[in-house]
Amino acid sequence: MLVVDDDPDVRAAVVDGLAVEGYDVRDAADGLAALSAVAAAPPAAIVLDLAMPVLDGLAVCRRLRELGDRTPILVLTARDAVSDRVAGLDAGADDYLVKPFALDELLARLRALLRRAAPGPAGAADGPGDAAGLLGYADLTVDPATRTGERGGTPLEFTRTEFTLLELFLRHPGQVLPRDTIQQHVWGADFGPESNSLSVYIGYLRRKLEAGGAPRLLHTVHGIGYRLAAP
């Protein structure tokens, strides 16, 4: 694990918490040091503060993704505005956590990221797809290998969490998926029904899928969950 934060107290607390859980942890105090650390020895995951001097977390995310690095990234931000969270995810982060945070939640989010990053057995995928491994529904086509796709000719890119959520719907088109089933699949048992992560990520997916005025595909089924359905 690599922990990147310019606040020495936050950095030390996260490093100590991860070490207690048995993770091999390194740390860096700024974005340039983080890039050097990743180049020297790629970590299993990165905990990355957004607001740092020299090179901020957004720039680090973008640089790693431009280099083709797919290491799971959990960003830390002191700002809870939707625009700030979206900026981190659009830069290539896989999940976010708002400061101040509970160490248990940080650990849970990292465990979820590591589960999603783990390669599955060959041939394990099921559900709708084609010979090339692509998934599609209506005018949406996505590639699980690259977590990219297009809708109506508009190219799309998804974070790891966004794609895990979207893939679940694509493999069960038309079915009403209960909230607890979706949360268990995407985040695991660490997240209870009080978590708002699912509604937040549904919002992120809708924002991308409905760009340019495209009709809604992800529909809320009140009191139950969500359903992928053509308009």
Image (cartoon, rainbow, N blue to C red):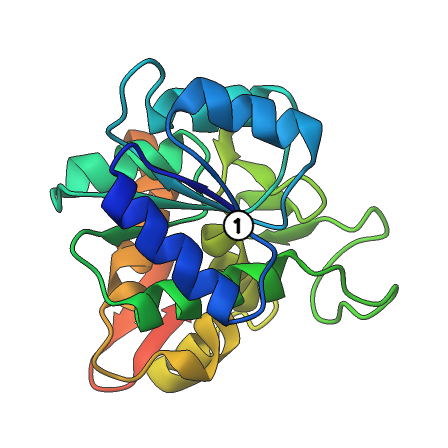
Q: Amino acid at mark 1?
A: Arg
- The image shows residue 194, relative to residue 37, as above or below, that is below
- The image shows residue 41, relative to residue 153, as above or below, that is below
- The image shows residue 94, relative to residue 110, as above or below, that is above
- Residue 100 point in image, percent of width and height: 16, 56
- Residue 155 point in image, percent of width and height: 52, 28
Pointer 1 residue: 160
- Residue 60 point in image, percent of width and height: 44, 24
The image quarter containing residue 89 is top left
Residue lying farthest to the top in this orientation: 54
- Residue 153 point in image, percent of width and height: 52, 27
State left or right for residue 192 relative to residue 189. left
Q: Residue at x 42, y 70 (%)?
A: 108
State left or right for residue 51 relative to residue 34. left
Q: Residue at x 36, y 28 (%)?
A: 57
In the depicted view, which residue is nearer to us: 94 or 150? Answer: 94
In the depicted view, which residue is nearer to us: 195 or 139? Answer: 195
Does residue 21 appear anywhere in the picture? yes
